[in-house]
Image (cartoon, helix red, strand yellow):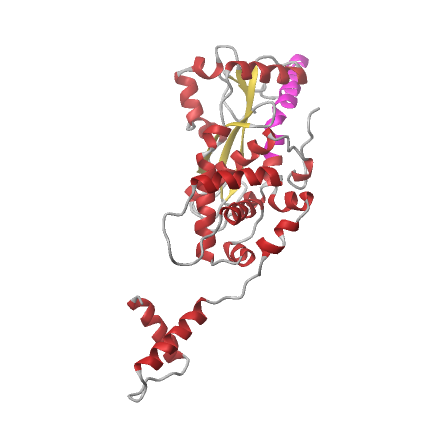
């Protein structure tokens, strides 16, 4: 037994009134130590949630709780199980891939703490944290497969869909930023709460094609944009991203560039043509706001991150973007997941 653990156990024994005497045998002391050790490790938890409750969820209930279809989750479980095999033996029973993935989804989809999640899934808090962290890292590693910039042919398809809305041609995507709550002291934003900024570029099908996250909440959207890898790559090689014909749409917070079209600034002197352009621009660009609304509504952890490190929060953001794109690719587009209250309308 570790000396530090022995010291703690002895302190607990003496605190509880047990006193060692010369007549006490070593075997009695060891028996007391083992008894107290087992008592310290034993905590009453919810029993058999994974074994007796989850398998009997109907498809609707499963989707409500885990925010994804059961068939898609099963594929994630298979992928996780094949790539994340425990390398050690001994100790407590291992968390199987099914429980690990469901714990990760539950964490991202709800606002529960690690204490509540460990109680629900019948494991310790430290095990819950390490397992969820591992699942999120696994999903983040998949990001290059699911958050991808469109090819030229995909860009053409995007532009045609965008053009069918209000007639704006050669649009490959829309860019905007949103806040992700955090409790980091130096990340106080202009709306008087702590957050980081998440910048997303979205295509015509409500999929993330580029993300940039982790900047302080008080940082202006234009500065966040200039610090992103998208900006650096676009300014150094516009042809590679926009194929010399496409561009993005952004709101008035962004700079007007050759490959980024923003609305006319409304100084009270706009003519009718400019007003119409601004309306068409907004009606086309709203796809990114719709996407953020769906994204935040599906994964409720976006509403509350208490005392987590910035790298961990950023990984959670990326993981949710990956899962969001997987859901969109599978055709799971449900207005039931929209952030409440819903301020966005889906364009037909």
In terms of secondary structure, what is the magenta stretch mainly?
helix
Q: Confirm whether the magenta stretch covers residue 218.
A: no
User: Vertical placement of 276 versus 315: above or below?
Assistant: above
Q: Quadrant of the N terminus?
A: bottom left
Q: Quadrant of the C terminus?
A: top right
Q: Nearer the viewer, residue 251 or 148?
A: 148
Q: Residue at x 54, y 14 (%)?
A: 153
Give the residues drawn in magenta, as a range.
268-293
User: Vertical placement of 85 versus 204: above or below?
Assistant: below
Q: Nearer the viewer, residue 289 or 223?
A: 289
x and y percentages locating residue 138 in the rendered image: 45, 39
User: Vertical placement of 137 versus 148: above or below?
Assistant: below
x and y percentages locating residue 277 in the rendered image: 64, 16
x and y percentages locating residue 216 in the rendered image: 45, 39
Q: Residue at x 35, y 81 (%)?
A: 28
Q: Residue at x 45, y 46 (%)?
A: 133
Furthest toward the top, the residue is 244
Q: Is residue 270 visible?
A: no
Q: Residue at x 53, y 47 (%)?
A: 98
Q: Nearer the viewer, residue 24 or 135?
A: 24
Number of on-image labels: 0
Furthest toward the bottom, the residue is 23
């Amino acid at each position: 037994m570790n000396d530090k653990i022995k010291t703690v156990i002895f302190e607990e024994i003496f605190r509880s009134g047990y006193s060692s005497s010369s007549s006490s045998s070593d075997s009695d002391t060891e028996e007391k130590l083992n008894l107290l050790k087992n008592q310290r490790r034993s905590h009453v938890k919810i029993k058999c949630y994974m074994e007796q409750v989850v398998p009997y969820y109907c498809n609707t209930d499963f989707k409500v709780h885990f925010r994804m279809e059961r068939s898609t989750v099963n594929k994630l479980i298979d992928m996780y199980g094949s790539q994340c095999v425990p390398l050690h033996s001994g100790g407590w029973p291992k968390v199987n891939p099914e429980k690990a993935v469901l714990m990760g989804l539950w964490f991202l989809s709800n606002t529960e703490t690690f204490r509540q999640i460990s109680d629900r899934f019948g494991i310790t808090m430290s095990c819950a944290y390490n397992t969820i962290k591992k699942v999120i890292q696994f999903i983040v590693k998949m990001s290059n497969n699911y958050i991808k910039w469109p090819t030229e042919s995909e860009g053409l398809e995007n532009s045609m869909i965008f053009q069918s809305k209000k007639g704006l041609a050669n649009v490959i995507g829309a860019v905007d930023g949103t806040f992700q709550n955090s409790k980091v002291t130096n990340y106080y934003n202009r709306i008087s709460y702590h957050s980081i900024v998440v910048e997303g570029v979205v295509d015509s099908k409500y999929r993330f094609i580029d993300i940039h996250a982790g900047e302080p909440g008080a940082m202006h959207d234009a500065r966040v944009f200039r610090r992103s890898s998208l900006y650096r790559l676009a300014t150094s090689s516009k042809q590679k991203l926009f194929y010399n014909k496409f561009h993005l749409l952004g709101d008035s917070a962004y700079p007007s560039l050759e490959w980024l079209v923003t609305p006319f600034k409304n100084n009270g002197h706009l003519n009718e043509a400019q007003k119409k352009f601004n309306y068409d621009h907004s009606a086309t660009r709203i796809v990114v706001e719709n996407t953020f609304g769906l994204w935040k509504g599906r994964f409720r952890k976006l509403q509350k991150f208490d005392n987590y490190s910035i790298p961990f929060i950023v990984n959670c953001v990326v993981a949710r973007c990956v899962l969001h794109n997987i859901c969109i690719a599978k055709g799971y587009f449900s207005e039931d997941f929209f952030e409440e209250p819903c301020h966005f309308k889906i364009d037909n």
